[in-house]
Image (cartoon, grey):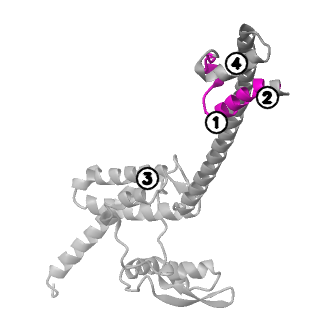
C-alpha cells in the first residue's frame, strides 16, 4: 500500500495540475526523472528495493500511461466543447434568422399595397368621364341617384367642383353603413382641393421610391413621365396642354385599374387616346376663337 502511494501519488498530483492547464497533452515532453524535481520519488523507489534503472523505467512508463489518459480526456473534452459551441452557434443563427424573418414580415406589412399590371396592356382609346364621388358612393351603396350625375354635364361639373371645394382632409361627415350611422372623412367622398395636377408632380417619382413602391411600378411611371416630357408635341401650339391632359387622365385611370386588379402598363403611350384628347383641345380652342370673333362683331349687323 505504501509502495502504491509512493508510486502513484506524484502522478496524481501531476495529473490534477495538468488538467487545469488548457494545453494539448500530446505536445508535452517526457519529464527528466533524474532531475532534482523527482529525486525524492526516485530515492523512495530505490529504497524500496527497486534498481535505479528499473525505477526510472517504471517512472517513465507510469508517465506515458497517465499521459495517454490525459490525451483521451483532452480529445473528449475538445469534442464536447466543439459540440457545445456548434449547438450555441446553431441556436444563435436560428434566433437571428427568426428575428430577420420577423423584421422582413414587419417591413412587408409596412410596404404600400398595390396590385400588379399587365406589361402588354395599354390604356383604353376612350376614357369614360368620371362622375362625382357622391354619385360613385351612391352606386357602391346600391342607393338611388339621379342619372344627371352621369351625364356629360354632370361629369364636367364634378371635375370642376372637385378642385374648387375647400373641405379639410380631417373633416368628418355622417354616413350610413349597413343601417348604422357612422363618421367618415369627407375626403372619401370628394377630391381634395390640395391635390395637384399631374404636371405639378415632378417630385412624385422620388417619393414613391422613398415609400418602397414596387420596382416594376416605379419603372413604368418613370417611362410614362419621360414619354410625356419628351413628346414631340411639347413644342407645338396647344401640344403641352394636350399632353398634360393625357397625363392626368391616364394616371388616374391607371390607379383605378390597379385597385380593381386590372392594371395596364402606363409606360405604353396610347397614340389613339392622345389624338382624341388633342382633337378636343383643338376644338375647344377653335370654339374659344369663334366666341371671341363673335363678341368683337358689331351687334347691329
Where is residue 123 drawn, in percent x and y?
Answer: 48, 56
Which of discs 4 and 2 lies nearer the camera? The answer is: 4
Q: Is residue 115 visible?
A: no
Name the foreground residue: 198 vs 136: 198
As rendered, which of 240 and 86 lies closer to the eye?
Answer: 86
Alpha carbons under labels 3 and 2: distance apart: 86 Å
Part of the protein shown in magenta: 4-32
Answer above or below: position of 45 versus 196: above
In the image: residue 237, left or right of residue 156: left
For residue 225, above or below residue 63: below
Q: Residues within 10 Å of mark 2 (few under 14, many from 20)?
A: few
Circle 4 Cα neighbour tier, 10 Å, few/some/many (<14 / 14–19 / ≥20): few
Mark 4 and mark 3 in contact (Cβ < 8 Å)? no
Residue of label 3: 218
Q: Is residue 143 left or right of residue 266?
A: right
What x and y, as percent, mark residue 62?
75, 19
Amino acid at each position: 500500500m505504501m509502495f502504491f502511494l509512493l508510486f502513484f501519488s506524484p502522478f496524481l498530483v501531476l495529473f490534477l495540475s495538468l488538467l487545469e492547464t488548457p494545453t494539448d497533452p500530446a505536445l508535452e515532453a517526457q519529464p527528466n526523472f533524474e532531475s532534482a524535481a523527482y529525486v525524492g520519488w526516485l530515492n523512495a523507489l530505490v529504497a524500496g528495493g527497486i534498481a535505479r534503472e528499473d525505477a526510472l523505467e517504471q517512472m517513465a512508463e507510469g508517465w506515458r500511461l497517465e499521459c495517454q489518459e490525459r490525451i483521451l480526456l483532452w480529445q473528449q473534452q475538445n469534442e464536447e466543447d466543439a459540440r457545445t459551441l456548434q449547438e450555441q452557434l446553431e441556436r444563435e443563427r436560428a434566433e437571428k434568422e427568426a428575428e430577420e424573418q420577423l423584421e422582413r414580415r414587419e417591413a412587408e406589412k409596412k410596404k404600400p399595397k398595390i396590385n400588379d399590371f399587365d406589361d402588354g396592356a395599354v390604356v383604353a382609346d376612350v376614357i369614360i368621364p368620371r362622375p362625382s364621388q357622391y354619385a360613385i358612393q351612391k352606386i357602391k351603396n346600391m342607393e338611388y341617384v339621379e342619372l344627371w350625375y352621369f351625364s356629360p354635364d354632370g361629369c364636367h361639373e364634378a371635375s370642376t367642383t372637385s378642385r374648387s371645394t375647400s373641405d379639410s382632409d380631417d373633416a368628418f361627415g355622417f354616413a350610413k353603413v349597413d343601417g348604422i350611422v357612422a363618421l367618415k372623412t369627407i375626403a372619401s367622398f370628394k377630391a381634395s382641393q390640395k391635390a395637384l395636377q399631374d404636371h405639378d408632380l415632378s417630385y412624385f417619382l422620388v417619393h414613391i421610391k422613398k415609400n418602397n413602391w414596387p420596382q416594376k411600378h416605379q419603372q413604368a411611371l418613370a417611362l410614362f413621365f419621360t414619354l410625356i416630357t419628351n413628346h414631340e408635341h411639347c413644342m407645338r401650339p396647344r401640344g403641352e396642354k394636350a399632353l398634360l391632359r393625357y397625363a392626368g387622365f391616364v394616371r388616374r385611370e391607371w390607379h383605378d385599374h390597379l385597385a380593381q386588379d386590372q392594371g395596364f402598363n402606363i409606360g405604353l403611350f396610347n397614340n389613339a387616346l392622345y389624338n382624341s384628347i388633342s382633337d378636343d383641345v383643338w376644338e375647344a380652342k377653335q370654339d374659344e376663337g369663334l366666341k371671341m370673333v363673335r363678341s368683337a362683331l358689331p351687334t347691329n349687323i
